[in-house]
Amino acid sequence: MGSLEDYAAAVAATRARLSEHPGLKDLVRYATLAANGHNTQPWRFDLAKDRIAILPDFARRTPVVDPDDHHLFASLGCAGENLALSATARGRGGVLRFEPGGAGSLVFEFSGGPAERSALFEAIPKRQSTRADYDGRPVAVPDLEALAAAARVPGVDLVLATDRRQIERVLELVAAGNSAQIADPAFVRELKAWLRFNPREALQMGDGLFSAASGNPNLPTWLGGLMFDRVFRVATENDKYARQLRSSAGVAIFVSEQDDKDHWVRAGRACQRFALQATALGIKHAFINQPVEVAALRPQFASLVGTPGRRPDIVMRFGYGPTLPFSPRRPPEAVMTSVPEGVA
Ligand SMILES: Cc1cc2nc3c(=O)[nH]c(=O)nc-3n(C[C@H](O)[C@H](O)[C@H](O)COP(=O)(O)O)c2cc1C
């Protein structure tokens, strides 16, 4: 199965501190540490001297949970935000914009400027989705304000729910969404294909949902598959989400102004910034997207969070909890296209 020690060493290398004068390849490495749906890493980086384009990799779609590629483009936004923060921290600031041409891509154009390190940049290698029970402690108001300020991206509204009754309403929709998803064999099959049951598998593939990173035991691949079939049930999963949400300090909901790729990317940028600010403050986060993934639940969820008629993009819980093993990443070489001579 491979050892957790070897796994941790390999992951530490992936997350090594960005050098003071990084090449483009190292900037790409930092970009790939971003959150992304099912950890499919659905991106390709196209490098040139004066810009990096982040292109969708449709071979890594998750068509069941994300039929219109909403999460895929949000994931590009997460990576773009990491890239912009990293380049800016190293004196290579620039502009990040969505290019609608073709399938749509995200372009970061370097313009230079002073090196501006930020708490968000420093948090990039430490951020993780922490799918554990938290300790129930509330987040103090100044920290909530810092989270809201960090997540400010034009075109995206953030709704913060910290009231217990409202969190219970969110939980009802998470449970309803979870029940619908688990009842769908295609959803379960797709999820299972991205599970990595032990360190060896996680390292070999460099992607997917590593069991230890979700607080689950390591198992041989064959046994992991069998166990998953036996234990992945609506009741146990809904109980788990109830515990996780009730032990969280609050829920952050990102709602963009329009339902198009540009705004899905913006929502991804906002949620990545929120997650980085949380990490900088010692606050954990995890995604609970069932109410936005199950399309039939979206109108009810939008009304609940006070944005009727709009499509909420991303749902995240936050609070104080343990640090779990990090999730794997593929090396930058595996996600770069066309590297002109001397560029990377
Ligand atoms: C758009 C988007 C949707 C996501 N949806 C979920 C989700 O519904 N449930 C979940 O547990 N994690 C979800 N995640 C988190 C990813 O699984 C996670 O980012 C990925 O496995 C990499 O792990 P890391 O965030 O710890 O680096 C989502 C992430 C993104 C960007």
Image: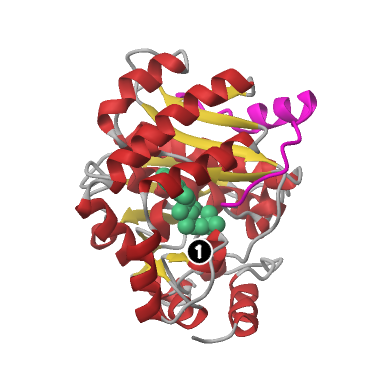
> Is any atom of residue 344 visible in this view?
yes
Quadrant assignment, res 192? bottom left
Residue plotted at (72% across, 53% down): 122
According to the image, label 1 marks what residue? 28
> In the image shown, does 258 or 129 lie closer to the viewer?
129
At which x and y percent is residue 157? 50, 22
Amino acid, disc 1: Val
Specify start and end residues of the magenta stretch as a single range: 131-157
> In the image shown, does 108 or 195 lie closer to the viewer?
195
At which x and y percent is residue 255? 44, 25
| Residue 37 appears left or right of 242 | left
> Is any atom of residue 104 visible in this view?
no
At which x and y percent is residue 281? 76, 42
For residue 84: magenta?
A: no
| Residue 343 appears left or right of 69 | right
Residue plotted at (63% across, 49% down): 88
